[in-house]
Amino acid sequence: MRKPPSQMERTMTLTLTLRLLALGVTLSMLGCGANLAPVLAPAHVPVVGPPPGVDGTARVHEAIVRALRSHSWAVVQDAPGVITARVERDKFFAVVDIPYTAAEYSIVHKESAPAFKFDGQHIHKHYNNWVRGLSASINAELLKPIPAA
């Protein structure tokens, strides 16, 4: 027959349980932060100059709009020299400003869903993936030959 645990054994079991619980909470908190990274903000990305006789600013504008559409971003505002765009997927959304000239463009974080945990410097990795893909698409659009009129 088994005897009941002593007070010391109960205290040791409780202490071990509390330590394991604290370890689990700590690891969980570290895991949440693992999805955060510095905000990706491509700035002053150079644009290969257009051929002579082509309006470079219009060419960059059209490339940005095509890239946005190919990634399901919606143009929210389209003003001379800056496009504001928004994308939504599940519980996430992001809004960016894309200032541009004939020579360069940038992608600037404007707003995002609380689930992205933006703190001014860090944000969820999904946002960076969206911006990285958008920037790559803009660059690919800019490399495409200009159709003959």
Image: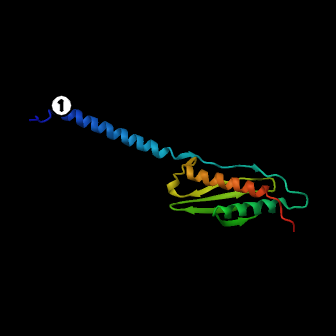
- The residue located at (71%, 49%) in the rendering is 43
Check the image and name the residue furthest to the front. 1
Amino acid under disc 1: Met
Q: Where is residue 55, by image quadrant?
A: bottom right
Q: Dot 1: what SS?
A: helix
Instruction: Name the spot of residue 32 as percent of width and height, x first.
Output: 46, 46
Q: In this view, does 5 lie above or below 82?
A: above
Report the quarter where the C terminus lies: bottom right
Check the image and name the residue furthest to the top. 8
Check the image and name the residue furthest to the right. 52
Instruction: Name the spot of residue 83 as percent of width and height, x first.
Output: 70, 62
- The residue located at (50%, 55%) in the rendering is 115
Check the image and name the residue furthest to the left. 1
Seen from the viewer's position, the closer of residues 18 and 70 is 70
Instruction: Name the spot of residue 82 as percent of width and height, x first.
Output: 72, 60
- The residue located at (68%, 66%) in the rendering is 77
Q: How is the image coloured?
A: rainbow
Seen from the viewer's position, the closer of residues 76 and 91 is 91
Q: Mark 1 points at which residue?
A: 8
Q: Where is residue 108, by image quadrant?
A: bottom right
28 relative to 8 in the view: left or right: right
Instruction: Name the spot of residue 22 as percent of width and height, x first.
Output: 34, 39
Seen from the viewer's position, the closer of residues 106 and 138 is 138
Report the quarter where the N terminus lies: top left
Q: Residues within 10 Å of mark 1 (few under 14, many from 20)?
A: few
| Count of picture labels | 1
Q: Is residue 29 above or below residue 140?
A: above
Q: Where is residue 15, by image quadrant?
A: top left
75 relative to 7 in the view: left or right: right
